[in-house]
Image (tube, rainbow, N blue to C red):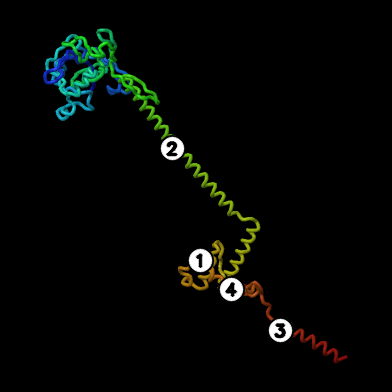
Amino acid sequence: MFLTDRVPLSGVRRTADGYLVADAFVARTGVQTYLGEELGRPDLLNVRLYRPPEEVFSDATLRSFAHRPMTNDHPPEQVNAQNWKKYAVGQTGDEVVHDQKRVRVPLVLMDQDAIADYEAGKRELSQGYSSEIDWTDGVTPEGEPFDAIQRNIRNNHLAMVRFGRAGHEFRIGDGGAPGAPDPGPHHHQKEPTMSDKTILVDGLSVVTNDAGAQAIGKLQAQLKDAQTAQASADHTHQAAIAAKDSEIAKRDAEIDSLKGQVLSDAALDQRVQQRGDLIGKAKAIHDADYSGKTDAEVRKAAVVAKLGDAAIAGKPDAYIEARFDILADSAKPRDPVAQAMRDGAVQRTPVNDNGWAASVAGLDYRTAGHKEA
């Protein structure tokens, strides 16, 4: 895991060629507080991280303080052979020493802009390094509680910053030796352990440190995510309501349309009369069963029966209706009595010769009687 710690410089002097040379305490043992996000634990706001002396003063860790590039603030990536020219403004030396709690290294600032920033008051240091986090809590020998332990600390670069996490004890001083008083304009000011930041919260400017700024930023991001999720839910809800309203409107339109199709009694009588007339004309053209057919189908069936399919092939309904009317006008009116007789509904009574003979015989009888008288 790659982390940063902030420490100051002391024992500063200028060389003949303008470089700024100093000895600086750059690290210490003990407990320092980090944001949970810095350690891959966003579920924790702060983590008290313990650096045991055996880890800080191990040979491998001490060697990693030597010949490290110096940077003006932390770069967005670890410094290596491919990018050191882009970020380096100086370097640390190899005479790394330590007391019971602190590590001290020599360093040189070689970049004029970085030296100008130092002269303007930018005097503390922040060590960029990697380490392993042992999530074992406990209490230090000095009685200070901690949440986790740093193991295998390896330094990557040393950045010059305005305020350091380790406090103003670890800074670039203006005295001639480590620990000498700093005559700079901020010598008597109480320095915070992290850099002050001004951030905008709900339209108000708030001054806080690095940890506070990151915590507020996290809360602002969570609030923004919640607002985005709520807006998305509102949009989905409104879309669902609009879809239901559209469905209801469509059903209302269908109901109104069906209501318009319901016939009144008078209209129904008229429709029955028209249907009867149409069926009568069709039967006059060709006597068939036209039940179950629409008006257009009745006309077409009658015309086809009379003239054949070829007569109306590809013709529109208006043409078929006109041919139907012409055929209906030319059709002879049907004689219902003759039709009934053809269908066998009326039985003929044959002429009886015996009845006629009897009638004639009666007449002869009446004539003969007259003669006898």
- Residue 31 % position (x, y): 26, 13
Please give the label number shown on residue 329: 4
Question: Mark 4 near mark 2, Cβ–Cβ under 8 Å?
Answer: no
- Closer-to-camera residue (66/208): 208
Q: Quadrant of residue 213?
A: top left
Q: Who comes first in sequence, dot 2 or dot 3?
A: 2
Q: CA distance from mark 3 to mark 1?
A: 60 Å
Q: Amino acid at mark 3?
A: Asp
Which residue is denoted by mark 2 in the rendering?
A: 236
If the image is split into quadrants, where does the C terminus sit?
Answer: bottom right
Q: Amino acid at mark 4?
A: Asp
Q: CA distance from mark 1 to mark 2?
A: 49 Å
Question: Mark 3 near mark 1, Cβ–Cβ under 8 Å?
Answer: no
Q: CA distance from mark 2 to mark 3?
A: 101 Å
Which residue is denoted by mark 3 in the rendering?
A: 353
Which residue is denoted by mark 1 in the rendering?
A: 317
Give SS at disc 2: helix
User: In the rendered view, would you say 354 is above or below 303?
Assistant: below
- Residue 369 % position (x, y): 85, 89
Q: Would residue 192 be visible to someone looking at this image?
A: yes
Residue found at the very far top of the displayed protein: 142
User: In the rendered view, would you say 156 is above or below 290?
Assistant: above
Give SS at disc 3: helix
Nearer to us of marks 4 and 2 is: 2
User: In the rendered view, would you say 190 is above or below 235?
Assistant: above
